[in-house]
Image: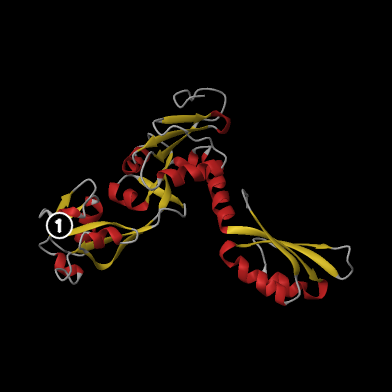
Amino acid sequence: MTSDDRSGTGPPTLRVAVPNKGSLSQSASDMLREAGYAQRSDTKQLALTDAANGVEFFYLRPRDIALYVGEGTLDVGITGRDLLVDSGAKAEETLQLGFGRSTFRFAAPPGTVSSPADLAGKRIATSYDGMVRDHLARHAIEATVIRLDGAVETSVQLGVADVIADVVETGSTLRQAGLELVGGVVMESEAVLVSRVDARQHPGLEVFLRRLQGVLVARSYVMMDYDIPAVRVEEAVALTPGIESPTVSPLHREGWVAVRSMVPRTDAQQIMDELYDIGARGILTTDIHACRL
């Protein structure tokens, strides 16, 4: 069934926007593949229907995705939180996706701006004029906002602006342009799933969300197996409580049990050391490729 044929006997196709380029594009497609969805193999492809899963993907400019979703043309989409806020679209953040993290900051030549109040009367170049205007209004700062599409770092050197406001990942590009960060973080951003206000009514959204949440858990946890003397099992379980509760099974070796539990990936090595110290042996970790909780 195509996106335009919603009169059949099956449920309507879920229409999903995916970034077609930029820093979010590859990571978004990778996550969708891990969730079991087909993805394009040709970057020139504008749409792809995964009929087996009842989903149609549209590859769009990240900046446009929140607008398409907010207007109801598409059901959900993957974009940056900064782009969602800047767009002013009638779309809502549904799920944080854990990649594409960045901050939104002001930057200026060293010594020219010492505090946010010094932005008053300045010319501020940005690709996020909606967000900047809102921030200035909330802090009662009057300044001139100049919208540029990309490469705002050079605007100060070219005399177009006094200050810039942009997404910052490492800050190296700003330093190369002779700029320094000014004030605190305006916004912390990352890739998010956005949905139209009434998207929860779509019968396909619950499965889609469950699959993405499964990928997030699988990326954050590993499965840990180990053998432990039965007399120490309570200590071991305290170290590996798992999501619900660990599985404990008797071993052929008398007085020993086998334990299986999900543990946070970032803590796995420390947990293995602590388990070994209380007598656990045969400690193994394996990746989780998919899960449902």
Q: Residue at coordinates 57% horizontally, 24% vertically from top-left?
A: 9
Q: Is residue 162 left or right of residue 216?
A: left
| Residue 114 percent across, percent down from the top left | 18, 72
Q: Residue at coordinates 51% horizontally, 45% vertically from top-left?
A: 31
Please say whether residue 62 is visible from this viewpoint: yes
| Residue 86 percent across, percent down from the top left | 28, 50
Query: How many numbered badges does the structure rendering display?
Result: 1
Q: Is residue 122 left or right of residue 227?
A: left
The part of the image, by quadrant, that contains residue 111 is: bottom left
Q: Residue at coordinates 53% horizontally, 35% vertically from top-left?
A: 38
- Label 1 crowd bin: few (<14), some (14–19), many (20+), radius 10 Å: many
In the image, residue 50 above or below residue 116: above
The part of the image, by quadrant, that contains residue 19 is: top left
In the image, residue 274 above or below residue 34: below
- Per the image, label 1 sits on a secondary structure element best described as helix
Q: Residue at coordinates 60% horizontally, 58% vertically from top-left?
A: 221
Please say whether residue 78 is visible from this viewpoint: no
| Residue 83 percent across, percent down from the top left | 32, 49
For this rendering, which residue is in front, 4 or 240?
A: 240
In the image, residue 30 above or below residue 272: above
The part of the image, by quadrant, that contains residue 250 is: bottom right
Task: Identify the residue under disc 1.
Answer: 156
Q: How is the image coloured?
A: secondary structure
| Residue 168 percent across, percent down from the top left | 31, 58
For this rendering, which residue is in front, 132 or 113?
A: 113
Q: As shown in the figure, which amino acid type bears the numbered disc 1?
A: Val
